Amino acid sequence: MKISFEQMVGEHRKEIIDIYNYYVENDFSAYPEKSFPYEYYDKFLEMAKGYPAYSIFVNKQIVGFCFLHAYNSISTFKACAEITYFIDKMFTGKGIGKVALEKLEKEARKIGIKRILASIASENDQSLIFHRKNGFRECGKFEKIITKKGKQFDIIWMQKDIE
């Protein structure tokens, strides 16, 4: 399996929003309750402006996306970024997330990022396990602040130092 990365661009809009909307509709890893229109892709690009942002390909097919974005836009937070990534359900568990994380960490160091934060639903055991295995530690929890599909749950914050 050949994994490659391309800068996120407008031509990737449909595939990326389709991947994201799968998680919106089917589990708790994406927080919204309703699918987004394709125009929402512009919000991803805006959030990631100035940070590494990639469409993930396997054999010329988009199978996911990953990007960093500001945790807080105030300049005193410039060494910290939040991570976002989603992999097509047919391609999870194949090491793509680990490769994407490594790619983002490498690019983050180049722009002075020293810490990466991840916001993860307490219902998303797979993501919590993945992040722990890859050097993240829990650094905070907001209890019962989100309700999706009639279920109330926590948001777990995890942090990785990459200096």
Image (tube, rainbow, N blue to C red):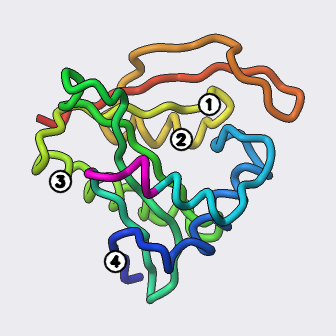
Q: Position of residue 155 (x, y in %)?
A: 59, 23
SS assignment at label 1: strand
Q: Residue at x 70, y 14 (%)?
A: 144
Q: Mark 2 = which residue?
A: 127
Q: Residue at horizontal 35%, vertical 59%?
A: 53
Instruction: Name the kind of residue labelled 3 in the image.
Output: Lys
Residue lying farthest to the bottom in this orientation: 60
Where 133 sits versus 16, above or below? above
Q: CA distance from mark 1 to mark 4?
A: 28 Å
Residues 100 and 39: in front is: 39
* Tag 2 secondary structure: helix
Q: Label 2, label 4: how many angstroms apart (C-alpha)?
A: 22 Å
Mark 1 or mark 2, earlier in chain:
1
**Residue type marked 1:** Ala
Label disc, if present, on residue 106 of the rendered structure:
3
Q: What label does residue 121 carry, if any? A: 1
> Horizontal and vertical percent for residue 61?
51, 84
Q: Is residue 47 left or right of residue 159?
A: right
**Left or right relative to 43: residue 18:** right
Residue type at tag 4: Ser
The residue to which callout 4 is attached is: 4
Instruction: Using a 10 Å C-alpha cutoff, classify the residue at mark 4 as few (fewer than 14 neighbours), some (14 to 19) or many (20 or more).
Output: some
